[in-house]
Image: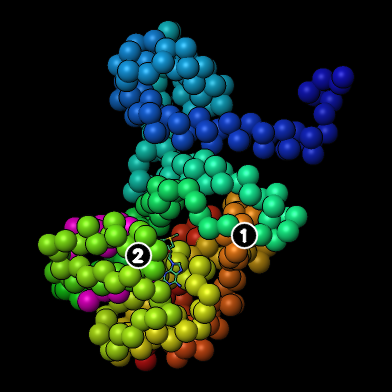
Amino acid sequence: MAGWKCRPKEFKRLWNYSVGFYGVWVAHVGRRTGLIEAIANRAVESDKLAEQKSLDQKAVRAWCSAAEALGFLKRRGKKVYLPARMKEILLEKKSPLYLGGQFSYLALRSLDYGSLEDLVRTGKTSEMASSFDAIVEATDWDHHAFMSAAKRGRLHKMLSIGCRVLDVGCGTGTFIEKLLQEYPRSSFVGVEPSEAAHRAMEMAAGKSVEIFRQTGEQMAFESEFDLVYLGESLYAASDKPAIASNCFRALKKGGVVAIVEGLLPEKVDDESRLIMGMQLDFALQGFSFMTKKEISSLLKGAGFARVAFTDFGGSLYLVTAEKP
Ligand SMILES: C[S@@+](CC[C@H](N)C(=O)[O-])C[C@H]1O[C@@H](n2cnc3c(N)ncnc32)[C@H](O)[C@@H]1O
């Protein structure tokens, strides 16, 4: 067998995908069990770490060794610690560098990937069986990215003074919860067709939030909202033009629709390779990503004007448009 140095670059690239697979699980399991958080605060010996967190000593040793080899943590003598930059990437949800939730999404979603073979053989799709946790992990960063983008524009003023917001496909309501904390003068309506609506209703109790269990296609609001938000929900809709025109009707004149969605790139590069791979995940659910052109003509077709794109990175965009 030829040595590593003699391997062609194609071999090395594919080899690294196998290493990356373990990287995803090192990150996810380290976050879930609190190991990453513990070593972010101080250097500690791996056996002590296991004791502190009431975890299995042998397994924690294996995790530390893997995490060190894969470049997550560093060792000082017998102690391991998480460098500051790693802490930001893995734990700080508000940082533009945050990837922790993405790793957990991938790990949790991969529990359903056994059905990918069936999809390819027969075209059989399957609904997201993995818990809401995967979605919450994936969208946390979207919410913070939206809120920091909103702060730079007129939405911040609208929300601060107090406006009426509709969240279409609100899931468990975590975005409304974050917005309400930041903008207590605004009031919120969430629309969600799945079981997640119950969790959103629990969150809404006693707050200026109403949740309806229905699809975006079924909404009948009229000239009621200043802002309509769709956070990674438009892709899942079976009748996108119907949702777009329901959002248009729901807005007051001058109101804004804000859509956060992954959009297919025109050209594949290192940053967009993830969404290209994620097409498999979406195909399994029976969905596909839109392009900038498709979402733009969808919005214009519903009557919206001034369609604008803000690049959140990693092929995730904030798309805004106005009701003239
Ligand atoms: C990836 S989750 C995003 C949840 C939430 N917007 C967030 O940012 O946390 C997509 C959500 O869209 C919802 N959804 C799917 N089809 C929909 C439709 N036709 N109308 C409204 N929501 C829909 C799903 O049930 C799911 O809760």
What residue sits 33% from the left and 13% below the top? Answer: 51
Q: Which residue is mark 1?
A: 125
Reading the image, the residue beneath label 2 is 170
**Numbered range of the magenta stretch:** 164-183
Structural distance between the alpha carbons of marks 1 and 2: 23 Å
Q: Is mark 2 within 8 Å of ligand 1?
A: yes
Q: Quadrant of the C terminus?
A: bottom left
Q: 13 or 209: nearer the eye?
A: 209
The three-letter amino acid code for the residue at tag 2 is Cys
SS type, badge 2: loop
| Residue type for callout 1 | Thr
Q: Which quadrant of the structure image shows residue 280? A: bottom right
Q: Can residue 70 be spotted in the picture? A: yes
Please tell me in which quadrant of the rendered image residue 57 appears.
top left
> Is 141 left or right of 267, judged from the image as shown?
left
Residue 246 on image: x %, y %? 39, 84
Magenta span has 180?
A: yes
- Given residues 267 and 129, the one toward you in this image is 129
Mark 1 secondary-structure assignment: loop
The residue under the point 39% across, 33% down is 32
The reply, left or right, for residue 9 in relation to residue 129 is right
In the image, residue 234 lies in the stretch drawn in magenta:
no
The disc, 1 or 2, on the residue closer to the chain's N-terminal end is: 1
Residue 223 vertical placement versus 180 (above, below): below
| Residue 66 picture location, percent across and down | 54, 21
